[in-house]
Amino acid sequence: MDADKLLKKHRRTVLFSPESLPHKLDLKREDIKRIIPHREPFLFLDGLTGIDIDTGRISGERRIPPEDPVFHGHFPGYPIYPGVLELEMVGQLGLCLHYFMKARTTTISSDASPVMVRATRLVGAYYQEPVLPDAQVSLLIQLLDNDGFFATVIGQAIVADTVACVVIHEGCLLEE
């Protein structure tokens, strides 16, 4: 895989249309908490909107609250959502994809528990546009590789049909 070539290709082009996903989801924060370990103030997903477990694709969303305290220091007078938090949104969506692919389901079971995956490497990222307060962010993930221990995904944060960020993450499974 030529990561830089893949990142450059998707700096301006969306990975896929969320409407193309065969399974529509309407899962909210409380549902997401059942499958990933993150909690407030570090839970950066508001909802999951669609999935294709056969192709390893998932879509989600997040509204950036204008009252988020991060805007007080990043940057006064010109608030921009930090890029590292954009990467975290994408990474958390990747954890959600892992849950659904591992369970081979498009639902969250009543006995679901958070997946234990650790980010091991940020392969690369491009920031194209700033994410501003009150932005509605669409998130996309596409599985690139999974050898049973390490999984690699490419993801995007999209605002108003514009790719704000594209990233390739790698993570390892901590338990099976």
Image (cartoon, rainbow, N blue to C red):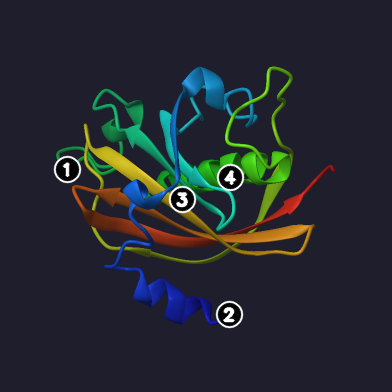
Instruction: Identify which residue is drawn at 58% across, 39% down.
Output: 96
Q: CA distance from mark 4 to mark 1?
A: 34 Å
How far across and how far down the image is residue 7, in percent? 42, 72
Instruction: Identify which residue is drawn at 30% across, 33% down.
Output: 64
Of the residues under marks 2 and 3, which one precedes in the sequence? Answer: 2
How far across and how far down the image is residue 130, in percent? 24, 52
Instruction: Identify which residue is drawn at 30% across, 41% down.
Output: 137
What residue does disc 3 label?
87
Query: Given the current orientation, which residue lies at the most extreme left position?
Result: 77
What residue does disc 2 label?
1
* Left/right of residue 141 with respect to residue 102 in the rendered view: left
The answer to whether residue 125 is visible is yes
Marks 4 and 1 in Cβ contact (< 8 Å): no
Quadrant occupied by the C terminus: top right
Instruction: Identify which residue is drawn at 56% across, 55% down.
Output: 56
Query: Given the current orientation, which residue lies at the most extreme front position?
Result: 22
Secondary structure type for disc 1? loop
Tell us which disc is closer to us: 1 or 3: 3
Amino acid type at mark 1: Tyr
Depth check: 38 or 9 in front?
Answer: 9
Q: Residues within 10 Å of mark 4 (few under 14, many from 20)?
A: many
Q: CA distance from mark 4 to mark 3?
A: 15 Å
Q: CA distance from mark 1 to mark 3?
A: 20 Å
Q: Residues within 10 Å of mark 3 (few under 14, many from 20)?
A: many
Depth check: 115 or 111 in front?
Answer: 111
The answer to whether residue 82 is visible is no
Of the residues under marks 4 and 3, which one precedes in the sequence? Answer: 3
